[in-house]
Amino acid sequence: MLSIVNQLKSKDISLDDAINSGKLPDHILHTFACDCAERALIRERKKEREPDPRSWEAIRVKRLWIEGKSSNEELDVAWAAAWSAARDAARYAAWAAAWAAAWSAARDAAWSAAWDAAWDAAWAAALDAAGYAALDAARKKERSWQKEHLLAMIEQYQTTRSSLLSTLLQRANNLTITIPQWQKESEDVLYS
């Protein structure tokens, strides 16, 4: 796992390749996915577009599942509900786009002047260019956060794992010292 951390830091491996490498513990990947999904929902909320409660519930159930406090069946139900919410949102987005297109067509028919059409096209192109640049910048910012967050999760896991192994080794050393003592004392009692 240390090599994944080093490769991510040195940009020798992409975030997607690290995630799909098969070298990261499942609980880190599941928690990472929950963190990313939750972050996306929070972003929507900040834009005053409250996400469907089924999406929040799916993340909550997934986190419980990671902790062993939710069954696979409960997770499947929450996942299906979240996908239903996503389909509902997609249908609404398609309806809104169709309505906007119809409205735009009606307006264009009413305002068929060439100057208006040219102005609209120029404005749309400028908005598209700005929108794509903003979208690309937002995507890069999010991927950077995701990479740093995954690195922090891996490093925390490694620190916790090292601490646990150290504690276990200390206890094992204590056991090897006390077992011979216990054996001698037991033999003294039994054979005296």
Image (cartoon, rainbow, N blue to C red):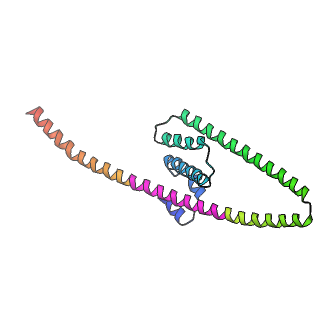
Q: Quadrant of the C terminus?
A: top left
Q: Nearer the viewer, residue 95 or 171?
A: 95
Q: Predominant secondary structure in magenta?
A: helix
Residue at 60% in and 63% down: 141
Vertical arrangement, residue 176 with respect to residue 124, above or below: above
Asked if residue 30 lies left or right of residue 172, the reply is: right
Residue at 63% in and 50% down: 49
Residue 11 image position (x, y, % from top left): 57, 65
Residue 53 image position (x, y, % from top left): 59, 42
Q: Is residue 51 visible?
A: yes
Residue at 55% in and 37% down: 75
Asked if residue 189 lies left or right of residue 99, the reply is: left
The single residue placed furthest to the left in the displayed view is 192
Residue at 75% in and 64% down: 127
Asked if residue 117 lies left or right of residue 131, the reply is: right
Q: Is residue 14 visible?
A: no
Residue 81 image position (x, y, % from top left): 62, 37
Vertical arrangement, residue 27 with respect to residue 120, above or below: above
- Look at the image and say whether residue 66 sits in the magenta stretch: no
Q: Which residues are magenta?
A: 136-161
- Look at the image and say whether residue 144 sits in the magenta stretch: yes
Number of dots carrying numbers: 0
To which quarter of the image does residue 88 belong?
A: top right
To which quarter of the image does residue 86 belong?
A: top right
Q: Nearer the viewer, residue 83 or 126?
A: 126
Residue 14 image position (x, y, % from top left): 59, 60
